[in-house]
Amino acid sequence: MAPSPSHLRSLYRSILRELPQRPLSIPSPIQQRIRGNFTNSGGNIARQVEEGEQYIQFAKAQRMYATLLERYNPGIGSKMDEEERVRLTARRVGMNLPEEWTPGQKT
């Protein structure tokens, strides 16, 4: 059974949502390729729909993985100095680092 046009349109939009944002007036090469595949699908349409749905699931899982990795391992993907990394590591195990004393600072 061939997928309905509304299902294909929904699938196409879902794929575009998973791609990095760009202005609609200047589509990226990958957006152009995806649109070409949807407009000129001459082969097994059901197989292409299934592959598109698998791609969407994969892209959502990758996005969730990156979100969780950053949440539970802060500083892995970002550039931070040594002091900030040590502070975050201490907080991860439930400790707060003491404030450093500097000469001339009142206690």
Image: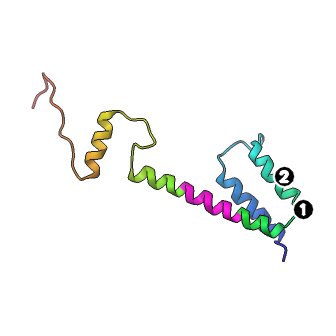
54 in the magenta segment: yes
Q: Secondary structure at mark 1?
A: loop
Above or below residue 102? Residue 9 is below
Horizontal and vertical percent position of residue 48 = 78, 64
Label 1 is placed on what type of residue?
Answer: Gly
Give the residues drawn in magenta, as a range.
Answer: 53-63
Horizontal and vertical percent position of residue 91 = 27, 48
Q: Which residue is mark 2?
A: 36
Label 2 is placed on what type of residue?
Answer: Gly
Residue at horizontal 81%, vertical 72%?
3
Magenta-colored segment: predominant secondary structure: helix
Q: Residues within 10 Å of mark 1 (few under 14, many from 20)?
A: few
Horizontal and vertical percent position of residue 99 = 18, 36
Q: Residues within 10 Å of mark 2 (few under 14, many from 20)?
A: few
91 in the magenta segment: no
Q: Which residue is mark 1?
A: 42
Horizontal and vertical percent position of residue 43 = 87, 64
Q: Please report contact status of discs 1 and 2: CB closer than 8 Å, yes or no.
A: no
Q: Earlier in the sequence, mark 1 or mark 2?
A: 2
| Quarter assignment of residue 53 | bottom right
Quarter of the picture containing the N terminus is: bottom right
Left-right relation of 106 to 15:
left
